[in-house]
Amino acid sequence: MSNSVVKHKRPPLVGFYFRKFTFFLVLFFMLGFGYFVVRTNQYYADEYPIAANSSQSTAIIRVEVLPGGQLVVDGKETTQKVKLLDQADEVSIPVLDNSGSSYEFVQILLTLPAGIASQTQHKVLAIHGVGSSKSYVKDERTIVYEANNVSPFAVISVVAEMPKGTIKLDTGRYIQQSLSQIKGNAWLLLTFIMPSITFIFMILIIAYKVRRTRIDVPDKEVPAPPMAIPPALVGVLFHQKVRSREVAATLIDLAIRGDIVILDRERTFAFGKGRFDQRLLGYEKILLSKIFKNNLSADRLEFERRINDHFYSKKISLVSAGIYALATRLGYFKTNPQRIYAKYRFAGMLGIVLGVAGFFLSVSYFTNPPYLVFFWVGMMLSAIELTLLAYRLPIRTIVGQETLSNWLAFKKYLSNPEPLPYSHDLSEMFQRYLPYAIVLDCEAAWAKRFENHNFALPNWFVTEKNGLGIGDFCLALFPIISYVSRSLVALREPGFE
């Protein structure tokens, strides 16, 4: 078997919930866009009752314009409103629309909110089977619209352009009207401006904090870990986040210490209990209890059954919480990273909720068409950016910065491209530092340093294959650990990422 190291592609750290969130977000936009199109293109007409004194040959309909711009037809308030144009306040309302009955004579009485009938321009729009139509002023507040020989399919609309300022809007209506007058291109542009401003703002904050908390990158490498701390703490110090790699490194570290055994079988795998050192940390005990429960071993089927039985896992959430808490107690962070990220996540989720609510309210109350929805889309995109970029904010203390600088010197040693000179304990050295290489994202480079040497299989890794070189060992071990760790991390409750 070849001892050459096969470079493996680092699996994308895309969590289970992020995929679900993306799916439902895309679904929401598809449904919302469909509703937007229907709302924009569908012609809405209120159904108005024919006046009580109407007969089969005559119909009389009364329309009243209220001071606030509402339109009332035969005592029924409609969804139509007076349009505030640049030069006039316009009433334009379809009063008779495919009624299904024919009339010899139809009369519509429009009552204005003030004595301005003589100053109002008026006309009647009649199509689809109307013999003749006209409009005239009856008195200072009333305009009459009349039509003769009206077919069952006729559409009759009344139009009245009142002097500008006739309608006195309340605050809510004024805001709605003002927003409705903004052109659609401006709202569409705002959709891109808001996320762009949020992105630039967050990048500037991150750059400012990075500059203030600059990490000294050492020039020289260090051939040994600078201190004896668990690999998971090194990973969270490096990335400020508990990822699947921290869980993977913890599993390998437990195997090296003799607490578990990893079995590589044909197309499957299993874990076996070891001696279980009493010096296990709290989060390590929780992690092992999740894998084994009350059994001495756990194969792939048993592991997948436990994973599929839970949408969330309190134990895995506590693993992340334990790592964050321990790193904070050691003075690496000013505040528990979990709490800081929770604040940004809450702000992001609040922005998304407000965006969704505003989206549907805009579609419901802003018509012809509801361009305001673009504002809410921009808000949701900004909220998503805020949530994702929050993980990039440097939150390490001075102690954390100095400690990370020391570990970066050790990373330079792990990722050094030069092969290691022969030593009788090379195999033991490889596995001892492997968990740290994983959390420092250089496990492939670390393995490559051993490709020219014979490799002794660790006693904690049991396989049916013979003559495995270090490259074959990595190809057998990494997929197992990667699959298990990513599956476990995907079970964390929201707020424990």
Image (tube, helix red, strand yellow):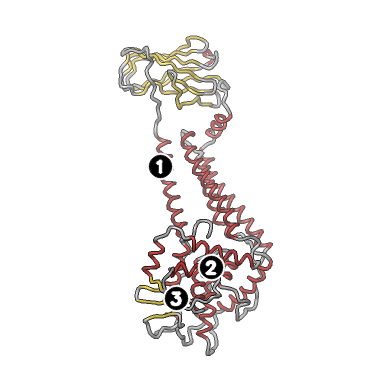
Please report the residue visible at 56 percent of the width from the left and 47 percent of the height from the top.
Answer: 194
Q: Which residue is mark 3?
A: 273
Question: For residue 186, which numbered disc appears in the image?
Answer: none
Crowdedness near tag 2: few (<14), some (14–19) or many (≥20) residues, C-alpha within 10 Å? many
Cα–Cα span, label 2 and label 1: 47 Å
Name which of mark 2 and mark 1 comes first in the sequence.
1
Q: Amino acid at mark 2?
A: Tyr
Cα–Cα span, label 3 and label 1: 55 Å
The foreground one among 40 and 333 is 333
Residue 356 drawn at (x, y percent): 49, 44
Q: Which residue is mark 2?
A: 283
**For the residue labelled by badge 1, is the local secondary structure a helix, a strand or a loop?**
helix
**For the residue labelled by badge 2, is the local secondary structure a helix, a strand or a loop?**
helix
Cα–Cα span, label 3 and label 2: 17 Å
Task: Give above or below for 108 relative to 31.
Answer: above
Instruction: Say whether residue 199 is left or right of residue 22.
Output: right
Residue 303 drawn at (x, y percent): 40, 67
Residue 132 drawn at (x, y percent): 36, 14
Q: Amino acid at mark 1?
A: Gly
Crowdedness near tag 3: few (<14), some (14–19) or many (≥20) residues, C-alpha within 10 Å? some
Please report the residue visible at 52 percent of the width from the left and 63 percent of the height from the top.
Answer: 318
